[in-house]
Image: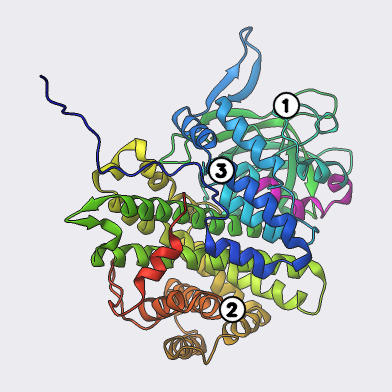
Amino acid sequence: MARTTHTVTNQPPPLVGYDVFTGDRALVEAVERHLDPGLLGEARESLALLGRATGSEQVREWGEQADENPPRLRTHDRYGHRVDEVRFHPAWHRLLGRSVSAGLTDAWDLPGGHVRRAAGFLVATQAEAGHGCPLSMTHASVPALRIEPELAEVWEPAARSHVYERALLPVAEKPGVLLGMAMTEKQGGSDVRANTTEASPLAAAGEYVLTGHKWFCSAPMSDAFLVLAQAPAGLTCFLVPRVLADGSRNAFAIQRLKDKLGNRSNASAEVEFDGTTWARRIGEEGRGLRSIMGMVAATRLDCVLGSAALMRQAVAQAVHHCTYRSAFGGPLAEKPLMRNVLADLALESEAATVLGMRLAAAYDAAEGGGADADRERALLRIAVPVAKYWVTKRCTPVVAEALECLGGNGYVEESGMPRLLRESPLNSVWEGSGNVQALDVVRGLRTEPLSLDAFLREVGAARGADHRFDRAVRGLLAELADLSGIEARARRLAERMALVLQGALLVRWAPPEVADAFCAARLGGDGGAAFGTLPHTLDLRAVVERARVEV
């Protein structure tokens, strides 16, 4: 009789068929904390519906299919006509349709709109991160569109629609649109003032034609783009639609798609404007950066939320694996050293989630016009680049360590962890890399003192609750008191500000075991450079249990 050689034992069940929202205690608590009680019931219901879909086997399969089948460029049709279209796998369209219908491009001016939308974005992108790019840019385009009321009247309702329409049509014929941006050029990178794309005015007021080349244009199948170009009076912001009002295609030549490390499902392209590309000016000539900064700030917050989503998914997978996988006589999660690693990862994930959701709440408060509106707006000015700098940088080491918790299984594509790892550096690069964010923090300190005051007030709300936190605040104040050589130490300052801000939020709102561990390791110096070096006297079991998903 033949021996059985392929009996499968000691393998964890797949982490599917669960509610991604309800299973995330830190996220649920943030929504409950920041939303008006009258909004909570409906918000929890809709977010749980999105969470169940995201955790379903079907949506997870869509995410895998979208990543495994990257977009393809089709420059010409069969007859030789230039079409400049990008073909996506059907799973991409299903993911986008699901997220648009969940309202992830619709937040502005709605009660609690930014908190609800941020929570939904954090949930939905755990299934597949690439489709978050057009969602983010479309949501973030609203402040720029509103600079020109005539444009906003046409484009904003379509951008905030809960209907996804993939066909390229004039905006008047579409129930919903997506918007992107094209700022970066090959000679300038983040230094957009070095852009050479030219904008020549036409006879009609506010209308121009563009000539130039954009090195990075994300989601090139969007319906319109915010573009920076040099007008006669200097760098200016423009809206460039793909299809003109008469139904003809605008001159928008896609030269090639980028072959990227991660974010494989989402197209990023080089595009050419040939001197006939029609554009509509947004704001005054020469004030392009001011016009587009509202969009940039909102997409930077989405970088924070996107990184928090990647971290949360990676930690959930690691804790799930170690709960069911046994080694050396018992479950891995019960081994003291593995528990230390998992708890350390869970701390980083929760700190990122709590910070991102606090900033989303600041957007709601700033729009609300209440007594705190100006202070919340000032807080965003400095806390967004602080968070963007730190949270996005922590993403890659968190995901890499979580992958290692699965051992060799985590290094295999079927686990999903390699896809998370490839995606993890992205948010630190997009919308201004680390140095850009750190220098933006310095700029805010120098030019907008109300922002520093708002930051210190936020941090000060937690003083007196933990001696390690209080000591870290004193150290930060000493650092801020001397701005000599500030550019060379801008990263050090941004890191300290981020850790103190995260510590303040966790001390105020997280369970004692979470706040205690964070303050010990991140603020008190009682932790090492690698994960899994928390003091063994902490309640690490409770920290890990909080991060575990019930399936």
Cα gap from disc 2 to disc 1, whole angstroms: 44 Å
Amino acid on which the number 3 mark rests in the picture: Thr
Which residue is at the far top?
A: 79
Query: Foreground residue, 52 or 410?
Result: 52
| Classed neighbour count for the residue bearing mark 1: other residues with Cα under 10 Å, few (<14), some (14–19), many (≥20) | some
Label 2 or label 1, whichever lies nearer to me, is 1
What's the residue type where badge 1 is placed?
Answer: Leu
Identify the residue under disc 2.
445
Spot occupied by residue 279 in the image (x, y as percentages of width and height): 77, 39
376 vs 472: above or below = above
Q: Is residue 182 visible?
A: no
- Mark with earlier residue (3, 1): 3
Q: Are marks 2 and 3 in contact (CB under 8 Å)?
A: no
Residue drawn 64% across and 46% down?
A: 49
- Of residues 92 and 347, the one nearer the viewer is 347
Cβ–Cβ under 8 Å for marks 3 and 1: no
- Residue 30 vs 175, above or below: the answer is below
Secondary structure that dominates the magenta span: helix
The mark lying in front, picked from 2 and 3, is 3
Q: Name the side, left or right, on which 32 lies relative to 233.
A: left
Given contact means CB atoms under 8 Å apart, are the residues at marks 2 and 1 in contact?
no
Q: Which residues are magenta?
A: 136-152
Residue 451 in the image: state x and y as whole percent.
Answer: 65, 78
How would you rate the neighbour count of disc 3 (Cα within 10 Å): few for under 14, some for 14-19, many for 20 or more? many
Residue denoted by label 3: 54
Q: CA distance from mark 3 to mark 1?
A: 28 Å
Whether residue 400 sits left or right of residue 272 in the image: it is left
Mark 2 residue type: Leu
Kindly state the secondary structure of the residue where label 1 is placed. loop
- Mark 1 lies on residue: 168
Residue for point 47% across, 79% down = 512
First reached walking from the N terminus: tag 2 or tag 3: 3
